[in-house]
Amino acid sequence: MSAPDVAEKLTSLAKRRGFVFPSSEIYGGAGATWDYGPLGVELKNNVKRSWWRAMVQLREDVVGLDAAILMHPRVWEASGHVENFIDPLVECRNCRKRFRIDELPDGARLMDAWRSGTADLTSTPCPNCGEKKLADPRRFNLMFKTFVGPVEETAAVAWLRPETAQGIFVNFENVQQSTRRRLPFGIAQIGKSFRNEITPGNFIFRSREFEQMEIEFFVNPHDRLEGRPADEAWHDRWIADCQAWFTRYGLDPANVKLHEHLGDELAHYSKRTVDLLYRFPMGWNELMGIANRTDFDLKQHAKFSGKSLTWFDEERKEHVVPFVIEPSAGVDRALLAFLLDAYREEEVRGEKRVVLRFHPELAPIKIAVLPLLKKRPEIVAAGHDLRHRLTRRWLTLYDDTAAIGRLYRRQDEVGTPYCVTVDVKTVGDPEKGEAGDGKVTIRERDTMQQIRVPIAELEHVFGRLLDAGTPWSEVAAGYPRAEG
Ligand code: GAP
């Protein structure tokens, strides 16, 4: 299957099955913003929860924060966003299409020329209509501007945050003092960010409203670790941890690689930046970045706020401005990568099946309870009862709106790792005086193997599979196989 094919099929599946809808669709869409449907919101929450658990709760050196989206306008002057969060916007005078300068033919060279004030576009054809009628580039700030209070005046200007990072920097002292942290330690935050992108696109890859999962990890620049400056060692550790998180939750390592920022690509405040790239259908592209931002941000905020943002090193008896290692990931981009990597088309007994092979922790629905015969009230009642019991611990769905084969395919297509089937043998047949065996069939999504398990043991079995992460093969070995 070609890459564009997968992208198209996935976008259509995402809409059809309620993962992602275009925002305000009944009004024709709202320009590169997206709404997450019933399954999408579960998947997104699971991505965020898994990241929070790995990066905050299971570590001793990171704590969490949830800062406001609207911040003091001086924050964005200090951070450099008012001055520098600029894209060079080029408009074609013929077809009126707009581009970022780096999207034009020979874009990298033109971008360099623009930075040095020498960009000449007179001989550059428009990528859309081919005419050589591109206007001179305009500076376009990507931040959304708004006003606080009822009067739209300069004094009331506020910006929708374009990154969550600054909420962390301005709270450095609050968090450090309230938690009595010593360096090194990190502050993590998940939340919405907004950028008025000139050319959003590729589904949820680049949109104007998105979520970020960011960590600012503060390190004493005078410390040494593994025989080198501590910030450099921590940078490498964070790169490895981030890469491991993505592959642990399902990305094929062959689809992930590192990209080192060199020369002009490196932001002026950064000592080193490494991107984690994913092989998206449109090519290798940024999944997340891990930057060594030095002491730039804390120094800037100290300068603009007049507050000293230092940490007292008891051993050396000196105040230091910590260096910052920043792992910064997009939730939507991570979700897109997990969706793409999970998507498979397989042939089963001569029929095509579409399956999302999500890691069970990310799967929106963990268990589906499916009755084999809808006409038998005891089967339906037992199914509802099971759903009720299991959903207290794992999101469980009951579905009896089609024949069993169809029901399995539906769950495969949304990545549900386990289906539980209640059948005649489970409940027996009172008319014939036959007692039920009190057992149900569990079917695993990827192998499609089925085992017969006593209802009384279901919680224990799913505890092993879904909480303890015990492999299916190990759990299945303890139970008789059921017919497929
Ligand atoms: N604080 C650093 C920072 O914001 P960035 O490289 O601009 O760095 C970090 O953004 C991550 O946020 C990106 O790697 C990407 O995953 C996500 N991201 C950035 N802009 C985005 C957009 N317009 N739509 C979706 N995700 C975006």
Image (cartoon, grey):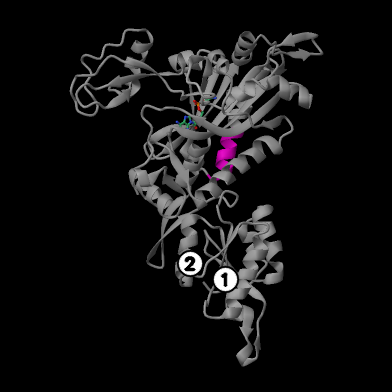
| Residue drawn at the location 67% of the way across and 77% of the way down | 438
Task: Report whether residue 380 is seen.
Answer: yes
Which mark identifies residue 205?
none
> Where is residue 365 shown, x and y percent of the image?
56, 56
Q: Is residue 168 above or below residue 49?
A: above
For the point 52% across and 64% down, the residue is 448
Distance of mark 2 from mark 1, alpha carbons? 10 Å
Residue 245 within the segment the image draws in magenta = yes
Q: Assess disc 2: are there few (<14), some (14-19) or many (≥20) residues with their C-alpha within 10 Å of its C-alpha.
A: some
Task: Tell me the residue at 64%/11% (across/down).
Answer: 305
Instruction: Give the residue type that dot 1 points to.
Output: Thr
Does any atom of ligand 1 lie closer than 8 Å to the CB of label 1?
Answer: no
In the image, is residue 376 above or below residue 107?
below
Helix, strand or loop under label 1: strand
Q: Are marks 2 and 1 in contact (CB under 8 Å)?
A: no
Residue 257, percent from left and from top: 49, 33
Q: Is residue 117 above or below residue 12?
A: above
Give the camera-side residue of 477 and 46. 46
Q: Which residue is mark 1?
A: 421
Mark 1 neighbour class, 10 Å CA radius: few under 14, some 14 to 19, many 20 or more: many
- Between 225 and 442, the one nearer to me in the picture: 442
Tag 2 secondary structure: helix
Residue 385 covered by magenta stretch: no
Q: Which residue is mark 2?
A: 407
- The answer to which of 79 and 251 lies nearer the viewer is 79
Q: Is residue 102 left or right of residue 14?
A: left
Q: The magenta stretch spans which residues?
A: 241-250
Can you give x and y, in whole percent of width and height, for residue 471 in the image? Answer: 63, 56
**Residue farthest to the bottom, as pictured:** 432
Percent position (x, y) of residue 30? 39, 38
Residue type at numbered disc 2: Leu
Which SS does the magenta portion mostly show? Answer: helix
